[in-house]
Amino acid sequence: MRNALPFSGLNVVDFGQYVSGPAVAMILADLGANVVHVDPPNGPLWKHSANAVLNRNKTNIRLDLKSGLDLDRALSLCSQADVIIENFRPGTMKKLGIDLDTLRETTPSLITLSLPGFASNDQLRKQWKATEAVIAASSGAFTDMGYNRVLMGCDPSFSPLTLGSAYATMLAASGVSLALFEREKSGQGDHIEVPVAAALMEGLSYNSINIEGMPERYHTMREKEITRRREAGLPMDVTYDELQEYLDPFYRTYKCKDGRYFYVVCPSHRNHARRCLELAGIYDELVAEGLPDVENLYLPHSQWEAETSIGVYPLPANWAAKISEKMKRVFITKTSEEWGKLFGEGGIPGAPHRSTQEWVNAPYSLESGLIVEVNDPEYGVMKQPGPLVWFEELGEELCDIEPRKFAEYQDAERLFSQAGLHRNYELSPNVEPDRQWLKGVRVLDLTNVIAGPHSTAFLSRFGAEVIKLDPTKPMYDPLIGVFFSYLSNIGKKSLLLDMLTDEGKPIFEALVKTCDIVVINAPSRQVEPLGLNEERLKAINPDVIFCRLDCLGGPKRGEKTDYIGYDDIIQANSGIMTRFGGAETPEEHAHLGTLDVNCGFAAGLAMSVALYARAKTGQVLRPRTSLSSTTNLAQIKYSHDYEGAPPRDEPSGREALGYDALSHFYQTHDGWLYLDATEADINKLEMLEELRGISTCDEAGRKAMLANQFKRKPNDVWLNKLSQLDVAAAQTRSIEWLRKRYSRPQDGQVGFDSGSYAFSTHDEHPSGYVTTMVDHYSIRPKEAKIIAAPQTERFGRSSRRVLGELGFGESDIQSLIDKGIVSDGWSEEFLPS
């Protein structure tokens, strides 16, 4: 069955340890590549059951690269490889005798991938011991945890999610896939660096964006309360229960009849909010009480005929309180599971809060292929994440996952000798020095909100031409519809078209004829009414790649396949919120787009693989992914289970500040420091005069000693001492601190030269607001070029241009606009005031 997979025949050497390197290789192996994973003589550096997941579908061997014989064996495997992966500190592989530059000189078609914690040109940090927590602490991931944590006075906050590695995995796997696609055209390989810190900053792009002078209408109740308290000099000491009253009724948790909790996420969409109120039986009651319903939410707020409207976020405090009280009384009448079924079947975004173990073992997770069973040689039958991306034609094959195979070098040599495609490539004499991987590729984007639009914005940095097609009348309010587009519509032409009308259908079909890829984010049941079934698309353009991503979809159909939802829905249902806030006080993981952004990267990966497959074999695949598969990667340490597994003891709740005394936040004389030591470091810590005797202390004693000593001296002193001992530690930084330090005026470049962090300030942003945002800088190929795509244009700005390119004359275009078939704008303002 693996011979049918798109990467069948590719040879990959995986030297990676911990998460990011092995996870990239896992994706390549899941997609059919022959992967040899190389561990040191004593086994993985990270002793964790997640290795059974990360090293599945691989041949696992052990080599001592400090031994001449084993080094020769490793080099022999590398000489037969199409892709080599490592995720160590810069220069480590070369010191071990494996020089990736030399290997590529010998074999120009070879693709090599490095995933250092910090960028190789980051002079300050590149040699730090870059653990997941050190990267997170350095990158603002533990300080910018959202408005809830600010109001509750939780700073810093800890989260055990390996977000940096999750983002880096998807970005790096995409980079490798695109390099393979390029190799089909030019025969040229590449070296790609993806610093985990840079990937994390791209993942947190919706947290780091700063728009100066945002209109008041977009400020939430929580933001207003934070401002009020700061101006009045009041403490941030809101309790969890008090916090609930600052939340929008369509964006909060409700207690149910079974004592468990249900999360509603349907703000900013008029239909979803109305369906929610109708299901609850309180819509007519609220209308009778005067609930406003403004027709055009894209007018300036001063021109509205009412103070607010259903389907707008945020609601003012008076209406939020009124609706919340009614909702609370309704939700207590049914169990959380009953509400989940009613919301799902009613087309309303919402889901019951569950733990990760409940998610992994849920019937739907198994029937859909989001979780699969793998018979691991160490743990027996394991429930593991299913494929992170898949293809509609290959769902069953991709779910047929082989357990990791413990083998000898000779087994790996035999595996590789059967394939190795790079030897068949000849370098094209016409390779452009600054070629773009996707130059000439056209994409038709039918997506909305974050994950879908982010996937196509991602492609634009590689030179793809993206046409963003939206309806002439927006379905979402401007906060979702426009504010999110600052990041998700970069590099696109915006066309507003009613593609379901008799006059709109031929325009849509003309666009499909010119495109390589069509993308939508919607469950399968919505595809047919939109006229996006496979038969119609193939009839229009037999070579078009149709990509679809959604919320709960998996490689196989199941009861919840067609349920709709957003990032927060899966956070609640898969256990992220329970872990972050606690079982009785669940709370959204505060990084906006936590899963959405990575789902966009995953769709970018799936489309890249489909382009490679089409170029390699002519086969046209239908790529798929979902928010649900993405959550399994974000929770890779916890999204698996097996008989006899020890109790989950991951840190959870607002009081969690680390894993144990050695991996924990400590207050220093001038701030906070995250120490990320292990038992193997205990003798090193003993070498510090201030910490002598720590090896004889119990857990409580260690924590007390470290807390007492750390607060006596400033961060710099401790970081210098710990760095000299090669003990992992970092000062906590905020995103605001990073943005101020690493921002530059927009210069049309991608900020590779800035090291691990790079932001651009756009004084002349098309919106009229001065805007600072993170660069698209985490994928760094040596040969190919990444471009700084143009900033997001106003919706409808390119309607006339796109139609003109299709051959329409100006009078015909104006006629279509007059009839409402086409529009050149939702509003006069980019971001309605």
Image (spheres, grey):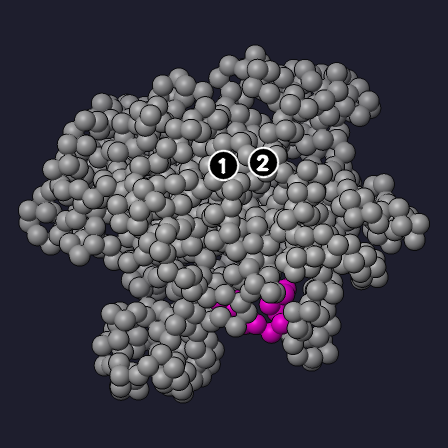
The answer to whether 311 appears left or right of 650 in the picture is: right
The reply to whether the C-beta atoms of the residues labelled 1 and 2 are less than 8 Å apart is: yes
Residue 637 coordinates in the image, percent (x, y): 40, 55
Residue 212 coordinates in the image, percent (x, y): 66, 58
Q: Which mark is residue 559?
A: 2
Residue sitting at x 13%, y 41%? 409
In primary-sequence order, the first of circles 1 and 2 is 1
Camera sees residue 515: yes
Residue sitting at x 73%, y 78%? 232
- How crowded is the residue under tag 1: few (<14 C-alpha within 10 Å), some, or many (20+)? some
Point out the stretch of residues depicted in magenta: 143-158
Q: Name which quarter of the figure residue 185 lies in.
A: top left
**Which SS class for mark 1?**
helix
CA gap between label 1 and label 2 equals 8 Å
Name, please, the residue furthest toward the top.
539
The answer to whether 561 appears left or right of 618 in the picture is: right
The answer to whether 136 appears left or right of 154 in the picture is: left
Q: Please state, as top left, top right, bottom left or bottom right, where the N terminus lies in the image.
A: top left
Residue sitting at x 28%, y 23%? 429
Camera sees residue 786: no
Location of mark 1 (residue): 367
Q: Name which quarter of the figure residue 681 lies in.
A: bottom left
Residue 385, placed above or below residue 504:
below
